[in-house]
Amino acid sequence: MTELRDELGELLIEKGFAPNDFVLGLNQSLTVPYDMELPAPWNLPSRLFRFPIEVSAPTKDRPRRIGLMHPLLADHPFVRRVAAALPIALDPGGAPNEHGYSKCRTGLWWHAVDLISEGQWRALLDTAEFTTPGNIFNAVAYGLRYSGYDEERKRNGHISTAEARTIMAELGATEPDQRTTLLHELSPPMSCNPDGRGEHWPINGRASSAEDHAWSFILGIEDGWFEYDRSGHLVWSKYGRDRHAAGDAGTYIESSTGQIALAF
């Protein structure tokens, strides 16, 4: 069987949207030129806005496909430029490969986590139509779990619990009544010593939903169950480990003193 000519790939390279066939196949997307000035909101630091067009590789009997990472990206200035240069329309549903896989769902996560990581959570709320509430909830948990590495060496999360609460309120999330029960949905604390320099108490497991997972980090920080280590990663505190071990009991044993304390 004669292989199909990759006319679309040749045209994308000819028009300067990809440097060569190798890079086009490697990235499976088109990248907005770094020197292209973009108006708001397209200039936000979101990979969804930086790589707005998906391109799948051709096969022997299937031509290359091209589509949008999100239907609303049709108004992106770079997308308009590409669309005007091609004789075919960009599929608003993306460009799945021969196995039916598309990066469009991943793009929804990119948008949420990238803006949270940059501290631009208000911009995320303003462009929430480019992602989903579930991805925003997961990004809130991510933003509380990890810290950035800026010049100020901030080591207490990409966002604060106050900012996280504002995001949750904007999304109409309801704070759980049973705080302790929610935190017990996470896996029991277990220590590890990956580099031989001391104990580390990572937070593992997930709550039953993305919304509750975000709340578990907010409440865990506020109630002292979690704390940030020197690297800025959120871990179980000694108090949190003791409380988790006590379950739903009204008292718990302080591991540092061996004394019984009330579980407020």
Image (spheres, rainbow, N blue to C red):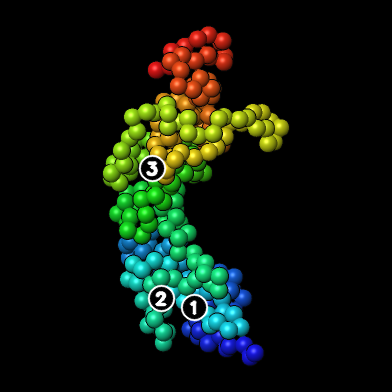
Question: At x 38% / y 42%, what residue is drawn?
Answer: 211
Left or right: residue 215 versus residue 231 is left
Tag 1: residue type?
A: Arg
Tell me the distance, in whole angstroms, between the alpha carbons under discs 1 and 2: 8 Å
Q: Secondary structure at mark 1?
A: strand
Check the image and report above or below for 99 versus 207. Answer: below
**Do the numbered discs 1 and 2 sit on residues whose CB atoms are within 8 Å?**
yes
First along the sequence among labels 1 and 3:
1
Residue 151: give x, y in percent of width and height: 49, 43
Amino acid under label 3? Glu
Residue 134 placement (x, y as % from top left): 39, 49
The residue lying furthest to the right in this view is 196
The residue at the point 43 percent across, 35 percent down is 216
Query: Which residue matches tag 3?
Result: 211
Residue at image mark 2: 91
Q: Nearer the viewer, residue 238 or 208?
A: 208
Mark 1 vs 3: CB contact within 8 A: no
Distance, label 1 to label 3, CA atoms, is 35 Å
Front one among 165 and 178: 178
> For mark 1, what is the residue?
65
Q: Is residue 58 visible?
A: yes
**Residue occupying image coordinates x 32% and y 71%:** 75
Identify the amino acid type marked 2. Asp
